[in-house]
Image (spheres, rainbow, N blue to C red):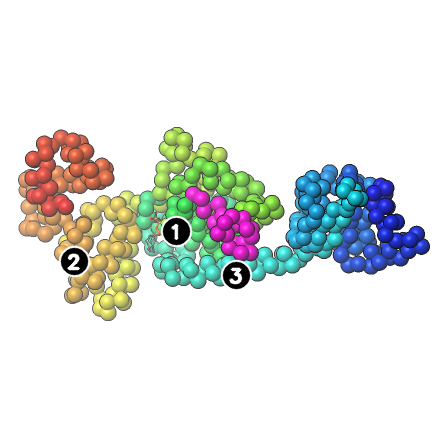
Amino acid sequence: MSDGAHAVITNAFPRWDRKLLFKILNNIHDVVMVIDSETTIVYANEAYAKILGVPVAKVLGRRLDKIEPKAAAIDLMRTGKPYKIGRDYLDSLGIDVVGSTFLLYDGNIIIGCVSIFKNITDVVELNRELQQTKGVADYLKEQLEQWEQLPLSFKEYVGQNSRLKETLVLAAKVARTDSTVLILGESGVGKEVLARAVHNSSRRKGMPMIKVNCAAMPEDLIESELFGYEDGAFTGAKKGGKLGKFELAHSGTIFLDEIGDMSLTMQAKLLRVLQEKEFERVGGNKTIKVDIRVIAATNRDLESMIEQGTFRLDLYYRLNIVPLTLTPLRERKDDLFELAKTFLKQFSGEVGHDLTLSPKVMRFFQEYDWPGNIRELQNVLEHASIVCSGKTIEIQHLPARIIPTHNDFNSEEKPYAVKEILARMEKELILSALDTYNNNRTNAMKALGFSRRVFYDKLLRYGIE
Ligand SMILES: Nc1ncnc2c1ncn2[C@@H]1O[C@H](COP(=O)(O)OP(=O)(O)OP(=O)(O)O)[C@@H](O)[C@H]1O
Ligand SMILES: [Mg+2]
C-alpha cells in the first residue's frame, strides 16, 4: 500500500481501531476501492471480490488506469473534479455500476481516490428488456394504424408466374436460415410483402420485424433512430434515452427499406453493425450486442450506384448474399387477372356488391405498362370500384391518368387509324419529356424539337395542364 492511503486511514483512526475499520469496510455490501496518486489500487474490500468476481489479491498493486482507463476515478484524477456520483460502466468486466467516487486530499494535494459502488447489471439488463418490450409495443401501436393488409406468408402470395415462383422458392429456402436477404425490384412490385413472408416463415416469426425506411429519415436523425441514444445525448433528447430500431429488432428481423437511399456516412455505420452485430447508442460508450436477421430492399440499381460512387461496394457484398429479384408486373402479366381478382374481391366487400372487369378493360390491362406495378393495379381498381356504380368496371371508370384517349379502347375498332395512333404516341412523348424535365416546359420543348407555338398548340390539343 502506498503511503497516501495509509495516511488517510491512520490519521483518522488510532492504531487500535484499524482492524475494526477494515472489518466495517469488509461488511459493507458495496464495493469500496481506493487508489493512490499513481492510480495503483491500494485497497479493495471483500465485496469487491464478491461483486466483481476478481480476487482482491489479484488487483492490489495494479494500476487502475491500465485495467479500466475509462473509470470515473481515473477521470477525476485527470481532470481534478472533486467527485462523481451516478452510473458507470466497467469496460474490462462488462458490468454496470452505480455509486460515488471522490478524490482524497492532503491539504491541496490529491493523494488518491475512493470509489464506492454497487453492481447494477441485472437491473440494467431488466430495464433494457422492459424498454425493449415497451418500445416494441409503441412501435406496433404506431404501425397498426398505418399497415396495409399485407399477405402474411408465401401461401398468400398471389402469383403463378414461373419467374415469380422461382423467386418464392428461393425465398422460402433462405427464410429458414439467418442469412441476410436483399430484395430488388421496381416500386410497388411487392418487396415489403416478400420481406414479411420471409420473416413470417423464419424461426423469428414470433418476434418483431422492425421496418426502417432509410429514404424517409432525415440524415441527422437516422443514427439515433437506428442505434438509439442515451439520456442527455443531445438537446431535445428524451429523458431516459431511447431505444433504436436495432435494439427493438433484437431476436427478430430488421427490414431496411429503400437501402439505396442511405447516405454514404450512414452506409459506413451500417456496415459495422452488419459485420459485428454490435453498436453503441448515440452519446453512450457501452457496446450493445444484438441478435438480428437483416432484410434489405431497394428499387434502385445498386450496381450502377457503386459505379457512380454513391453506394459502398463492401456494404453491397454484405447485403447481397441472397438477392431476391421481383419481376415487374408488365413482365408477368399472366398473374394480372389473379391479382385483379384478389383486389376486386376485397373492394367488392367494401362497396357492397360484386365487381367484374369488362372485356375492354381486360384488354387494356394486358396492354398497359403498369409502371407502378401491383400497387398501381390495386389503386386503379380501388378508384374504379368507387366510381363504378354498377357491377362491371368499364374504361371510363379508370383514373383519368391512365384512361387511353386516342386509341381504340374507347372508340370504334380502327386498328390502322394512323393519325390517332401517331397522336397518341406524340402525347405520350410530350408527357414523358415533361416528366424528365420536372415540368420545365422550355427544356421539354427543346428536347422535343418543337417551336414554342407548335408546342403550346399541342399542349392545348392534348389537354395537358
Ligand atoms: N403478391 C401479392 N399479392 C397481393 N398483394 C400484393 C402482392 N404483392 C404486392 N401486393 C400489394 O401491392 C402493394 C405494394 O406492395 P409493397 O408495398 O410490398 O411493394 P414495394 O415493392 O415495397 O413498393 P415500394 O418500392 O413502392 O416500396 C401492397 O399494397 C401489397 O399489399
Ligand atoms: Mg416498399
In the rendered structure, the answer to whether residue 27 lies left or right of residue 280 reads: right
Q: In the rendering, at what x and y percent does residue 305 appear?
A: 38, 34
Does the closest atom of ligand 2 sit within 8 Å of the Cβ of label 3?
A: no
Q: CA distance from mark 3 to mark 1?
A: 25 Å
- Looking at the image, which residue is at 41% across and 31% down? 309
Q: In the rendering, at what x and y percent does residue 332 appear?
A: 29, 47
Please identify the residue farthest to the front as the structure is shown: 107
Does the closest atom of ligand 1 sit within 8 Å of the Cβ of label 1?
A: yes
Q: Earlier in the sequence, mark 2 or mark 1?
A: 1
Nearest to the eye among marks 3 and 1: give it. Answer: 3
> Label 3: how many residues lie within 10 Å, few (<14), some (14-19) or many (20+)?
some
Three-letter residue code for mark 3: Lys
Q: Earlier in the sequence, mark 3 or mark 1?
A: 3
Is 1 magenta? The answer is: no
In the rendered structure, the answer to whether residue 38 lies left or right of residue 337 reads: right
Query: Quadrant of the rendered structure where residue 320 is?
Result: top left
Q: Decide: marks 3, 2 in contact (CB < 8 A)?
A: no
Q: Secondary structure at mark 2?
A: helix
Three-letter residue code for mark 2: His
> Label 2: how many residues lie within 10 Å, few (<14), some (14-19) or many (20+)?
some
- Reading the image, the residue beneath label 2 is 397
Three-letter residue code for mark 1: Glu
Question: 232 or 463, which lies in front?
Answer: 232
Q: Secondary structure at mark 1?
A: helix
In the rendered structure, the answer to whether residue 236 lies left or right of residue 129 reads: left
Marking on residue 192: 1
Residue 293 visible in the picture: no
Q: Decide: marks 3, 1 in contact (CB < 8 A)?
A: no
Q: CA distance from mark 2 to mark 1?
A: 29 Å
> Label 1: how many residues lie within 10 Å, few (<14), some (14-19) or many (20+)?
many
